């Protein structure tokens, strides 16, 4: 029963995120007069749907992803349907096309902000202060002199503003090497510590610990909720952008990424931690989807926006057939990448 519940929650969470994302494209396509063939949640064969006006609204069999099919994305389909030229995506002004493309990710960001705010308002937020609350006796941090009450200012030359920053910078640091911590002591003096994490083996697995704990005060009320929403949203964005950057520089490896199988595993973990954690997971994933889609890579929304920028620079549109072929090629490459990530996720289960 637990597996079924987790699977349903996984489908609902991804379905909402996809619906909101594709809804952004759909709304602005309708506003600007682009012909919309289909609005679909899921991929693969149709299992249920209806047609209203010119557009088909469908649920498809594979509950991962979705799409909003616009006239102009498939030139052969446009010829078969005899779509008026002024209803094609390419016929619209660059700014109109930009709005259609950008409001998929923007809707994801808006959804995330709303969810985080609701969590803080009804369940409470936290202060997110990067202040040490506990140091384990005889730990690596204890031995160099870090104490409860120390406020983290920097880790390996990265500025620290919240407790999330500490988790992020330690997660991407090489635990086998010495880390540099700059803290503010109770006497308002800065002190620099060089710390190498302790290597610990538990249940056949190797972990690295610094022995530092951070406990956050619960916050309530409208003002505190707004503050928490701002801090947490900025923190997630920072995590996403740094992760993408580290992926290209090699600090984050491909096998550290997660796909649908990995997300399903996390859904089960967050469900056991409570409803608020599930809502937070949805917000986190929504920002992830938005940021990834804005990357200037063909097949992503950011790739389409990149072609709009190229058009503005060169003063004329890129050949639609050439652009579609480039997007199709990168889509195939992305599907291969997703298959590799999914395979790695499955290996992690065993």
Image (cartoon, rainbow, N blue to C red):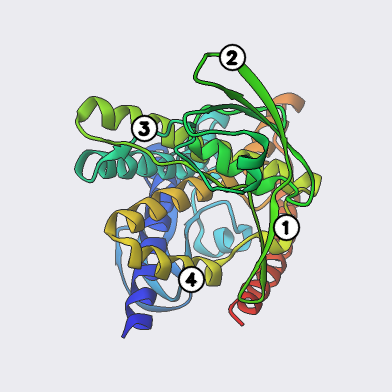
Q: Is residue 72 left or right of residue 127?
A: right
Does residue 262 lie above or below 316 as drawn? below
Classify mark 1: residues with Cα within 10 Å, few (<14), some (14-19) or many (20+). some
Tag 1 residue: 330
Which x, y percent locates residue 167? 56, 44
Which x, y percent locates residue 102? 51, 38
| Foreground disc of the pair 3, 2 | 2
The answer to whether residue 95 is visible is yes
Q: Secondary structure at mark 2?
A: loop
Does residue 279 lie above or below 76 as drawn? above
Q: Sequence order check: which comes first, mark 3 or mark 4?
A: 3
Labelled disc at residue 338: none
Q: Is residue 65 left or right of residue 175?
A: left
Q: Sequence order check: which comes first, mark 3 or mark 2?
A: 3
| Foreground disc of the pair 2, 4 | 2
- Label 3 and label 4: CA atoms lie apart by 28 Å
Asked whether the beta carbons under mark 1 and mark 3 sit within 8 Å of each other, the answer is no
- Label 1 and label 3: CA atoms lie apart by 42 Å
Which x, y percent locates residue 203? 61, 76
Tag 4 residue: 265
């Amino acid at each position: 029963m637990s597996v079924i519940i987790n699977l349903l929650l996984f489908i609902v969470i991804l379905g909402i995120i996809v619906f909101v994302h594709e809804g952004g494209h759909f709304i602005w396509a309708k506003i600007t007069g682009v012909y919309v063939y289909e609005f679909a949640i899921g991929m693969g064969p149709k299992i249920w749907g209806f047609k209203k006006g010119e557009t088909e609204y469908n649920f498809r069999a594979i509950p991962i992803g979705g799409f909003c099919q616009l006239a102009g994305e498939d030139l052969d389909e446009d010829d078969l349907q005899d779509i008026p030229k002024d209803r094609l995506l390419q016929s619209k002004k660059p700014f109109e096309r930009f709005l259609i493309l950008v409001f998929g990710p923007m809707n994801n960001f808006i959804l995330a902000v709303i969810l985080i705010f609701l969590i803080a308002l009804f369940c409470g937020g936290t202060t997110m202060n990067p202040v040490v609350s506990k140091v384990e006796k005889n730990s690596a941090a204890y031995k160099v002199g870090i104490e409860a009450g120390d406020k983290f200012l920097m880790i390996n030359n990265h500025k620290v503003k919240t407790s999330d920053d500490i988790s992020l910078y330690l997660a991407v640091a090489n635990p086998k090497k010495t880390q540099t911590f700059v803290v503010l002591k109770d006497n308002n003096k800065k002190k620099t510590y060089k710390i190498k994490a302790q290597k610990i083996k538990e249940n056949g697995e190797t972990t690295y610990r610094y022995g530092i704990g951070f406990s956050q005060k619960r916050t309530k009320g409208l003002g505190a909720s707004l503050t928490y929403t701002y801090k947490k949203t900025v923190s997630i964005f920072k995590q996403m952008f740094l992760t993408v950057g580290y992926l290209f520089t090699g600090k984050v490896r491909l096998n550290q990424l997660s796909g649908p199988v990995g997300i399903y595993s996390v859904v089960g973990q967050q469900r056991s931690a409570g409803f608020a954690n599930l809502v937070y997971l949805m917000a986190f994933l929504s920002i992830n989807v938005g940021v990834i889609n804005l990357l200037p890579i063909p097949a992503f929304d950011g790739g389409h926006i990149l072609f709009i920028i190229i058009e503005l620079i060169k003063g004329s549109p890129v050949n639609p057939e050439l652009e579609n072929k480039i997007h199709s090629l990168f889509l195939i490459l992305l599907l291969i990448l997703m298959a590799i990530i999914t395979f790695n996720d499955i290996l992690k289960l065993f």
